[in-house]
Image (tube, rainbow, N blue to C red):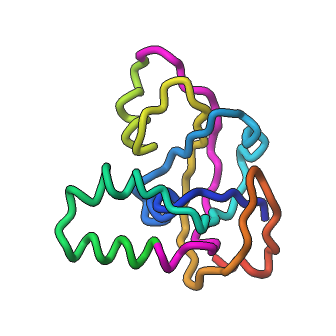
Amino acid sequence: MKAITLWQPWATFVEVGWKSIEIRTHQRLKGLIGQRVAIHAAKKIDTNCLLNRFIPYMDSIQRLNLWKHVDRCRGHIICTATVADARWAPNVDFVEREEWNGKAMCEVAGKFCLFLENIKPLKNRVPFRGRQGIFNAPDELIKD
């Protein structure tokens, strides 16, 4: 199965269904349209995302639970998703912009968007070394 790596907590946000658009500054992932892909949670954590965008709005229990989950998932394949579409978002205002921003959990204008559907968390996370770009993960490791 093809796989892509996302920094944490973004991979977790895909896993729990909060994020269904992944953005990139290139279109090298366009070949994944129509395929089921594995989502790998990188060991790297986007601390700016957590500390400045989400943590301030959570109570202490939510904060602790999010940190624990993000930390446990690092370096694992955590879910699979179907890439329904992939295309550039216009660099100007467009009708769906707010909706896309919400699904991407960030600004999409001028970015390449992967539209993820049918997201399925894995019952057992798979420890795996991620890579940049698209890579192969053994099918036998990923049991939906």
Q: Of all residues shown, which one is farthest toward the left? A: 59
- Which quadrant of the figure has residue 56? bottom left
The x and y percentages for residue 141 are 75, 80
Q: Measuring 41% from the left and 27% from the top, which residue is drawn there?
A: 96
Q: The magenta stretch spans which residues? A: 71-93
Q: Tell me: residue 113, above or below residue 118.
A: above
Q: Tell me: residue 19, above or below residue 60.
A: above
Q: From the viewer's perspective, is 11 left or right of 137?
A: left
Could you tell me which quadrant the N terminus lies in? bottom right
The x and y percentages for residue 135 are 80, 59
Could you tell me which quadrant the C terminus lies in? bottom right
The x and y percentages for residue 2 are 77, 60
- Which quadrant of the figure has residue 41? bottom right
Give the total number of marks visible in the rendering: 0
Q: Measuring 61% from the left and 64% from the top, which residue is drawn there?
A: 42
Q: Tell me: residue 122, above or below residue 3.
A: below
Q: Measuring 56% from the left and 50% from the top, which residue is drawn there?
A: 116
Q: Of all residues shown, which one is farthest toward the top? A: 92
Q: Measuring 54% from the left and 26% from the top, which residue is drawn there?
A: 89
Q: Tell me: residue 105, above or below residue 110.
A: below
Q: State yes or no: residue 64 in magenta.
A: no
Q: Nearer the viewer, residue 113 or 128?
A: 128
Q: Of all residues shown, which one is farthest toward the bottom? A: 124
Q: From the viewer's perspective, is 132 left or right of 11?
A: right
- Which quadrant of the figure has residue 112? top right
The x and y percentages for residue 66 are 35, 71
Q: From the viewer's perspective, is 103 left or right of 110?
A: left
Q: State yes or no: residue 76 in magenta.
A: yes
